[in-house]
Amino acid sequence: MTDQPCIAIDAMGGDEGLAVMLAGVASARRRLAAQYDGLNFLLVGDETAIRAGLESHPNLSAHSEIVHAPELVGPNEKPSQAIRRAKVTSMGVTIDLVKKARAHAAVSSGNTGALMAMAKLSLRTLPGIDRPALAAPLPTLGDNDVVMLDLGANTECDARNLVQFAVMGAAYARIIFELDRPRVALLNIGSEDQKGTDEIRAAATELRAATHLPLAFTGFVEGDKLARGNHDVIVCDGFAGNIALKTAEGTARFVGDLLKRAFTSSIRSKVGFLISRPATQLLRDHLDPNNHNGAIFLGLKGIVVKSHGSANELGVATAIANAVKLVRADLTRRIAEDLGLDHRPAPAPVAVIDTGVGV
Amino acid sequence: MTDQPCIAIDAMGGDEGLAVMLAGVASARRRLAAQYDGLNFLLVGDETAIRAGLESHPNLSAHSEIVHAPELVGPNEKPSQAIRRAKVTSMGVTIDLVKKARAHAAVSSGNTGALMAMAKLSLRTLPGIDRPALAAPLPTLGDNDVVMLDLGANTECDARNLVQFAVMGAAYARIIFELDRPRVALLNIGSEDQKGTDEIRAAATELRAATHLPLAFTGFVEGDKLARGNHDVIVCDGFAGNIALKTAEGTARFVGDLLKRAFTSSIRSKVGFLISRPATQLLRDHLDPNNHNGAIFLGLKGIVVKSHGSANELGVATAIANAVKLVRADLTRRIAEDLGLDHRPAPAPVAVIDTGVGV
């Protein structure tokens, strides 16, 4: 849609602080500058702190503007509480820049629940979508990652929500994996028709009948087959999705810790490890969450990317690269199209940007 | 309770067939014979086939009896259908031997749903228990495994079910880990009080207040911290438990597959792998599900152990060793005590065993 994407960055969110956020933005700019000549950033947060931080990144300074916001959303702040302070927080102002079409997408490493609540309230959902869902690509043994949603935005979902998630997830997979008809499965505790909750079975019935949609419904998938590469999209409620995502993260770390123990248990195994290191380094890169960072809230009238709270410079850059890709692919319009709905024109590229306005 | 445990074995259940079941029983007997002089088995299934299979295990023959059952429960058979044929199936007859106090415990590698339904119908739940739960110990980085329940027997649960699971799981952990006050947590999608479903929050409130119980309630645990070794029991509904268990299994296999790829990607890495092999073999043993085999249905008036459908000889032997340990520790009585309930006297040891009765 535009070769001059403008991305609003919640510079104050995330556990790692402003310096890591700015390093990540600078890194993303270096990575993407050749491809997107006019790429620029709105850096939202405490103006003085950001200005000081930018001194280490002169190149970024030339392609960004600071938008002041005096307050922060705390990592454990309740969404209902954060919403009341939206207008003065870096997170709220970042989202508002998308709403006002001053930016094409927002990226935040802050409190997920607050981000979801603010984004929904400010940007609103696409017509026909009851609830946005948090989606992210996860690594597999196959040719592409698998998009999983919802990852925790909606604790409980009905069949209608799950079907909407399937359509949105498929639209997302079509863009990021460049597929015509993504294979979509519902997460369940068995592959037989009678397994699972009423909601899941009803969603399956509806998806089986919806042959007009640009997706191939493949039935139920169990937790042990998420990473096999047999599916492009896996749909579930936010409770199951969060449990599955975090259990996968925890188990990968657990196996890694056991490996470390094994490889350091004797001189012999240490030597073997050092020899194999280039290979295990590749594996580490493949599993590093920072290489898969950037969950997105699907179903909103605007692009909001959630970077992991503990993302490092690489992770922040990956999340921003995802945001730019989705802006470029016109994600919001394409989801609206797949839902068979009218859509609004995308915001025009932002050339001149005011700074320092409290919004 | 007895030094002469008698274990009923569903010899026909499981994906690996009769030969693997018999090899597993023979292996368990060899492993346990020194400790339990009078250990013996009731092998349930097709009499002719079992008799032929026993020719490879003369030692087992001397310590087992065959109980004929002409039919099988299929791996995908609906529980409601299997129940109607209970009396003629190897699974149903195996459970019935526990009900009739001819065996102290039943072990089956067959269809989980059918086993649960038959066990509940035949043995009944302990007074005060609404639903039995499937529990199993899983590996951690800590000093002991962690007991997780429910793993799939109950798709949806209310707060009362979850509290009962906590009490039963703690009683189980006290026995197998030899702990006084096991640390019990509820699986959730966040650690803050307001996270999760109404059911989980209500269960937390109740467990926090129940300081008279022989357990230490530690609040909510997220999926990425299951294997850290900070908890002894993790409680959830059967949907979340099944998703978490299978996702952990699948992720461990996924990381293993990636490691295999990494180690075979070059001559150099292959050499390193061969040198480190003794260490990685230890890791493999630690993660091998056959070393953790033997889920148990807690809350029944009798001990029923579910061996994994694809368990090998080692897996079947591990499940049987678990069953014997639980018989010896008088699990059913101890759970009933923890629930503050009356309990029935344990069945007397079986000295002489009839064979061939169709029950």
Image (cartoon, coloured by chain):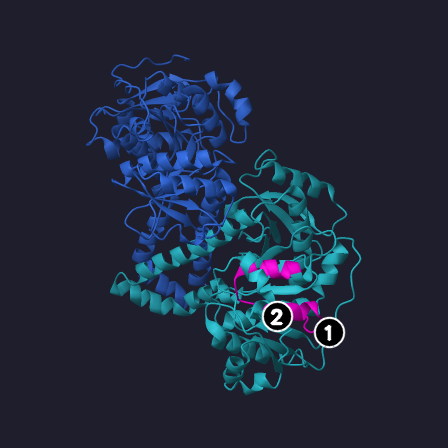
Chain colours: A blue, B cyan
Point 45% across, 41% down: residue: A236
State which region is magenta: B96-121
Protein chain holding label 1: B
Q: Which of these two is toward me, B270 or B90?
A: B90
Measured as percent of width and height from the top left, residue B306 is found at 57, 63
Kindly identify which numbered label has been placed on residue A126: none
Q: Distance between the residues labelled 2 and 1?
A: 23 Å
Residue highlighted by disc 2: B93
Q: In which quarter of the image is the C terminus of chain A?
A: top left
Q: Residue, x 53% and y 53% (percent of image)?
A: B227
B20 or B283: nearer the viewer: B20
* SS assignment at label 2: helix
Secondary-structure class at tag 1? loop
Q: Which residue is pictured at 69% across the width and 43% down the height?
A: B207
Residue bearing mark 1: B2
As displayed, is residue A20 above or below residue B269? above
Q: Is residue B154 above or below residue A9?
A: below
Mark 2 vs 1, N-terminal side: 1
